[in-house]
Amino acid sequence: MNISPLDPPAVAGLLLAGGRSTRMGRDKAQLDWHGRPLGEHQAATLAATGARPLFLSCRSEQRWMPPAFTRLDDRAPGGGMRAAFVDALAATFACAEVALVLAIDLPLVDASWLAALAVQARVEKESCVPSRDERFEPLAAAWHCSALPLLRETIAQNKSLQEACAALREKSLLHALALDATEAASLANLNTPAEAARLGFPA
């Protein structure tokens, strides 16, 4: 039987929604995006890639939960975003070779573009992470399970996620995908009310 690149258990989806949104001042998942909560929009984008199963990484006190997703609570709230990210990846890799990751605050990312990253990661057997202006975009990327040991090692050394990506690239475990201007624009994220206003969110 032929298996397409996104058929389970090849690629799972991981939606990251555990940030505290301190600069935004409210939960980003509840922001209004063209008449529906941003969280619903992002969950639909990730589901549209064909990745299965689908996981939501979030804090234990967060109550929002998209249908058909499995909840992954942050087990170490004091460990910061990096530790929560690596823990969520590890849980996802328990049932898939590739974790297709999307952050809650990247509303312009296209599902077909994401799916193409997953195909590349599976074929190349290495993580496919977009890169622009010498910086990696690890929260809209296709992570291959081969990255996990070095990710854990670099995070344990208190290195940044940018440093972890650089180390993975040096070991030929990460493909840094150069972005054109249109792709780079689709990775605009929301950290503040001013950024949200620029992307068309109502006040």
Image (cartoon, rainbow, N blue to C red):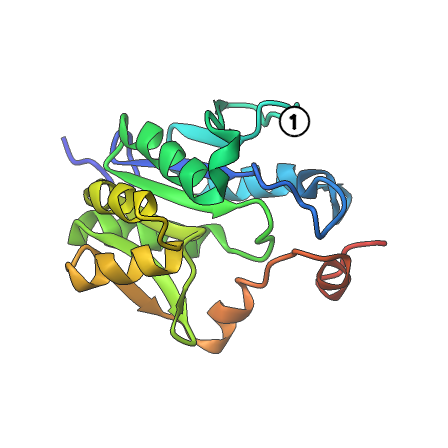
- Is residue 185 placed above or below 77 in the rendered structure? below
Q: Describe residue 13's horizontal placement relative to residue 36 as left or right.
A: left
Percent of width and height locating residue 149: 21, 41
Quarter of the figure that contains the C terminus: bottom right
Q: Residues within 10 Å of mark 1 (few under 14, many from 20)?
A: some
Residue under pointer 1: 64
The answer to which image quadrant residue 124 occupies is: bottom left
Of all residues, the one furthest to the right in this rendering is 203
Q: Quadrant of residue 6?
A: top left
Q: Which residue appears at 16% of the width and 36% of the height? A: 2
Q: Nearer the viewer, residue 161 or 125?
A: 161
Examine the rendered structure and indicate whether residue 60 appears above or below residue 181: above
Q: Is residue 26 left or right of residue 122?
A: right
Q: Nearer the viewer, residue 26 or 45?
A: 26
Query: Which residue occupies 59% across, 41% down?
Result: 19
- In the rendered image, residue 200, in percent from the top left (x then y), is placed at 75, 60
Q: Does residue 47 appear in this view?
A: no
Left or right of 193? Residue 16 is left
Q: What amino acid is labelled 1 in the image?
A: Trp
Label total for image: 1
Question: Looking at the figure, which quarter contains the N terminus?
Answer: top left
Whether residue 141 is visible: yes
Residue positioned most to the front: 157
Q: Name the residue rendered at 55%, 69% in the picture.
A: 185
Q: What x and y, as percent, mark residue 48?
A: 48, 41
Q: Secondary structure at mark 1?
A: loop
Q: Position of residue 47 (x, y in %)?
A: 48, 37
In the picture, measured across the screen, residue 63 lies left or right of residue 8, that is right
Q: Residue at x 28, y 34 (%)?
A: 7
